[in-house]
Amino acid sequence: MDVVAYYRVSTKGQGESGLGIKAQEEYVRIAAEQQGWTVVAKYTDSGVSGSVHPLERPEASKAFAHGLPVVVAKLDRISRDVEHIAGLMKRAQFKVATMPTADTFQLHIYAVLAEQERTFISERTKAALKTLEASAAAGDIDAMHSVANREDKLRKGRTMLNRQKGRDTQRTQADERAAELKDKLELCIFKGARTLQALANCLNESGVPTARGGNWAPTSVQRVMDRLSLTFPQ
């Protein structure tokens, strides 16, 4: 079956570096080999938000104009909006590399659940910010520093507050680094890695360094997977 590949990255920086695109290309390549698809054309939108309707994006509109099934690495590359996805299903065909055999009903349900989870996360974040602002207004120094981002005061002395803030910052940086690695780890698992050593080998072979610039080992991979609550498929 002939298909058209479509890739999307939300920032121009991602598009220029090729990091996000490379992972998406690998997902599509593997799915195409497994499903017997022939990719006859490729289109990429860089610096385009998932909130923009697919048919209003410069390259996505070209991809769908072929009249062939359009393949994306993950559903959110098409859109993060359930209405967009539901409407597009009535007008065009598309496939998702991570769920190559899913029908339109299954894809719609997945999109609804994903949007619901984003809503929950947004609500939890807003609630946490309100609590933080209330604490700052009540005189909580830690909250005041967080809201105002007054890093100059955090550098003064080695008080318990500063040490705690430093630990919080380290945890935040570790969480952000883990989030950046999630797609790469999922891709390694998608390609067949089923042990920590296999994941470490996959990351090393891909030229992905650890936070300190070294090579990956099973223990360092396990720490990242724990942060992401990522497990091997059963």
Image: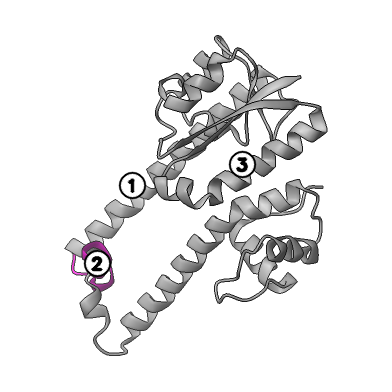
Q: Is residue 173 magenta?
A: no
Where residue 57 sits, quadrant-wise, is: top left
Residue, disc 3: 24
Q: Earlier in the sequence, mark 1 or mark 3?
A: 3
Q: Amino acid at mark 2?
A: Asn
Residue pictured at 47% horizontal, 45% vertical: 15
Q: Give the residues drawn in magenta, as a range.
A: 138-148
Q: Amino acid at mark 3?
A: Gln
Q: Is residue 142 magenta?
A: yes
Percent from the top left, x then y, of residue 146? 28, 66
Q: Farthest bottom residue? A: 157
Front position in the image: 118 or 207:
207
Percent from the top left, x then y, of residue 134? 23, 58
State the count of labels: 3
Percent from the top left, x then y, of residue 166? 39, 78
Q: Earlier in the sequence, mark 2 or mark 1?
A: 1
Does residue 31 appear left or right of residue 93 in this picture? Answer: right
Chief SS of the magenta region: helix
Count residues near mark 1 (Cα–Cα under 10 Å), then give few for <14, some for 14-19, many for 20+: few
- Secondary structure of the residue carrying tag 1 is helix
Residue pictured at 81% horizontal, 33% vertical: 34
Q: Farthest top residue? A: 90
Residue pictured at 79% horizontal, 62% vertical: 198
Front position in the image: 77 or 196:
77
Residue pictured at 40% horizontal, 27% vertical: 52
Which label is found at residue 126?
Answer: 1
Percent from the top left, x then y, of residue 26? 68, 43
Front position in the image: 209 or 76:
209
